[in-house]
Amino acid sequence: MSLVLRVDGDRWRSHLKDVRARHPALVPVVKGNGYGFGLGRLARRSGWLGVDTLAVGTYEEIPAVEQRYDGSLLVLTPWRPWNPAPDNPRVIHTVGRVEDLTALAEHGSSSGRRPRVVLERMTSMRRHGFSAPGLREAAALVLERGGVHVEGVAVHLPLARGSHLSQVERLMTDVVAAGLAAGHGSDRRTIWVSHLTDPELDTLAQRYPDFTFRPRVGTDLWLGDRGALSVRATVLDAHPVERGDVYGYRGRSAPRPGTILVVSGGTAHGIGLEAPTGEATMRARAASIARGGLDAAGLVRSPYTVDGKQRLFAEPPHMQASMLFLPRGTAVPEVGDEVDVRVRLTATLFDRIEIS
Ligand SMILES: *Cc1c(COP(=O)(O)O)cnc(C)c1O
């Protein structure tokens, strides 16, 4: 019953090395389901890449990576008072509120172990971070009372639609105005960024030669060469049906003659939880219904490709298997054959990962 992520190892590793070579200050992001690969594997891979820091999404993810990688661990979710005491010297905390910074500084002053922090400046994302005045207040607090070791400012930008440069430049003005970096070492002149293109990073490096820009990259690193990755399911069974034959948990009847194909992969893997792609517009669907298409029978597109086409689910996916409907005339694969599956790797749990 397996859903397999198959990786062309040479091609994948050479892509990783290429991204690494283009970004000496790269910070790999290792979070969630590990972009399909798993957190542990990507932590080891980050060590192999020779980076000094990796980023995890949450504090809960630290145990999955800390034994497999020995550099610094940047936590992307901002620290809050309910998170663990900030004593792990390998952890860099993201801070986006004055009260949290105050709490960390107090902890540092009383324990004598200054927590490592990056101050997050809010972007047009409006997810987390200081406003411009908030960043000035935070900088003043750090300069007056210490208690934390500031390792730069973070900006998390939305996925690219047009250039981010003008926004980053406005934010850089706030960083400079906050006075945090003036007269201090390179740590405080580090800007942790995400979702900038290579030309944008080059431009920023030229315009702000005193600062180091550190790109935090997940998708474009691990999944950047999609051609090196394929997702394969196995055909588990095939049953010819006539129009009207009953099948499935819900006792549906076949809309046409064809084959019910049972393939590995179901809700437990994350199959079927994504929006259908392709002909999803109302108009396209209406046209298909007018033609008497199978979606008129209430069948929904699946991510499985059989005989060159993305097929419809015969019914909603089961926990570990899915039933597809193949209309008569389709070349029906044999039990044991593999079929291609198009899934979002960040939302899929694989039974096996095979890296050649
Ligand atoms: C997830 C995340 C990233 C990496 O995003 P990708 O699109 O996977 O490269 C970078 N920065 C922050 C703050 C994130 O949460």
Image (cartoon, grey):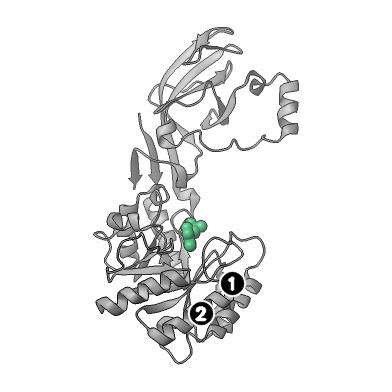
- Give above or below for 23 relative to 228: below
Q: Secondary structure at mark 2?
A: helix
Circle nearer the N terminus (1, 2):
2
Image vertical order of residue 356 relative to residue 248, above or below: below
Residue 51 visible, this angle: no
Report the number of numbered marks: 2
Amino acid carrying label 2: it is Glu
**Helix, strand or loop for disc 1:** helix
Q: How many other residues sit within 10 Å of disc 2, few (<14), some (14-19) or many (≥20)? A: some
Would you say the residues marked 1 and 2 are in contact, meaning their CB atoms lie under 8 Å apart?
no
Estimate the x, y position of residue 356 in percent, counting from the top left.
Answer: 34, 48
| Mark 1 close to ligand 1, CB under 8 Å | no
Q: What residue type is disc 1 on?
A: Pro
Q: Position of residue 211 (x, y in %)?
A: 49, 82
Q: Is residue 120 left or right of residue 43?
A: right
Image mark for residue 137: 2
Q: Nearer the viewer, residue 148 or 296?
A: 148
Quarter of the picture holding the N terminus: top left
- Is residue 175 visible in the rendered structure shown here? yes
**Nearest to the observer: residue 310 or residue 51:** 51
Residue 339 image point, x, y percent: 46, 31
Q: Which residue is mark 1?
A: 199
**In front: label 1 or label 2:** 2
Residue, x 35% and y 60% (percent of image)?
83
Q: Hey, which quadrant is residue 48 in on the image? A: bottom left
Label 1 crowd bin: few (<14), some (14–19), many (20+), radius 10 Å? few
Residue 184 appears left or right of 62:
right
Calculate the distance from the C-alpha at mark 1 to the C-alpha at mark 2.
Answer: 32 Å
Q: Which mark is residue 324?
A: none
Q: Quadrant of residue 197?
A: bottom right
**Residue that appears at 53% across and 32% down:** 305
Position in image of residue 154 (x %, y %): 49, 71
